[in-house]
Image: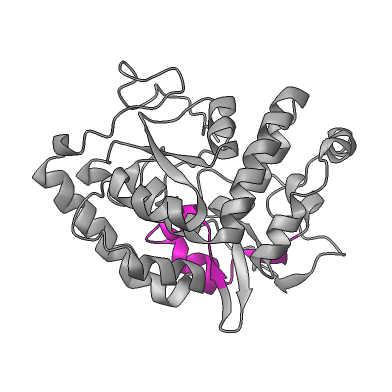
Amino acid sequence: MTGQTEHALRGDYSRMRPDYTVDQDWDAYTSAQHDLWRRLYARQAALVPDYACEEFRATLATLDYGAGIPRFDAINAMLHPATRWQLVAVPGLVPDLVFFEHLANRRFPVTVWLRDPEEFDYIVEPDIFHDFFGHVPMLFNPVFADYMQAYGRGGIKAHALGAIEMLARLYWYTVEFGLIETRAGLRTYGAGILSSGGEIRHCIESPRPNRIGFDLLRVMRTRYKIDTYQETYFVIRDFDELFAATEPDFAPYYRELHALEPWTAATVLEGDRVYHRGSGAARPPAREASNPRAST
């Protein structure tokens, strides 16, 4: 979603259209920015084979954008025929309802600015590298692409019902920080992990976090961390399970959850399907990924 922060929003909003879109203006990127992109890309591409899900790896292999910042129009020429999605350029974080409306219409907002070199390992809010490297490959998967549209439509309803916080938890624990069960073991499909140099290892290898089977109401009742690696990751069996979770009307769920106290990020319940119970050791350092749009 919008990833609300306490500091002034970064990005040039002076030329945006009513739907918050802007022109990418690819020619304005400098050689230094392209070089920074190449270094960010090389770091993450080297980690993907060991930690990312097959769907992400397969698409990444077909998208040759390691040489510099990609042109959105060139990617759209491949993305739209594949899943009827398109990328739209935005100046930075956008309001919740604007974000939902873009997703509901199969448009994914991608921030146009790139972090500074000193932010190589940590950035406060999403930049083009997080948005593009982390999110775009998964939009080529038909089931996941449909899930994203269903999430956007659900977000419009949640906005009207005052339930964005609960729906934000679903986005956070799936689109940004989700794990998936595979024949090779647990792997990640979450953009916040895939664009992070540290959390991509941590989510799979560290003994600290919990790894718990996905359950819709469990997820929507669980708080999350925005300033450290996650204390709990939720694991889906496949993307069909994720898409099926968005089919019911969420209104009864919101009514039920409104009356309940949220669980902490570290909570493990007796009925959880536990893949790994975390050690509860000292908190790791702040994650390298940006502050995704799911925080409200």
Residue segment shown in magenta: 187-214
Furthest residue in direction bottom, as rendered: 183
Q: Is residue 182 above or below residue 32?
A: below
Q: Nearer the viewer, residue 192 or 265?
A: 192
Q: Quadrant of the C terminus?
A: top right
Question: Is residue 30 on the magenta stretch?
Answer: no
Q: Position of residue 140 (x, y in %)?
A: 48, 59
Q: In this rendering, does residue 224 appear at all?
A: no
Relative to 262, say whether 91 is above or below: above
Q: Is residue 197 visible?
A: yes
The spot of residue 268 in percent (x, y) is 77, 60
Residue 178's x, y, as percent? 59, 59
Instruction: From the viewer's side, name the closer residue of 130 and 223.
Output: 130
Closer-to-camera residue (122/135): 135
Is 251 situated above or below 207?
above
Describe residue 31's horizontal placement relative to residue 260 as left or right: left
204 is within the stretch colored magenta:
yes
| x 50%, y 69%: residue | 55
Q: Quadrant of residue 282?
A: bottom right
Identify the residue shown where x is 58% and y is 72%: 207
Q: In the rendered image, which quarter contains the N terminus?
A: top right
Q: How many marks?
A: 0
- Colouring rule applied to residues: one colour
Q: Along the line of sight, which residue is nearer the eye, 270 or 56?
A: 56
Name the residue: 69% across, 58% down: 242
Residue 42 figure quarter: bottom left
Q: Position of residue 21 (x, y in %)?
A: 39, 27
- Hey, which residue is sitting farthest left in the picture? 31
Vertical arrangement, residue 200 with respect to residue 181, above or below: above
Q: Residue at x 76, y 54 (%)?
A: 245
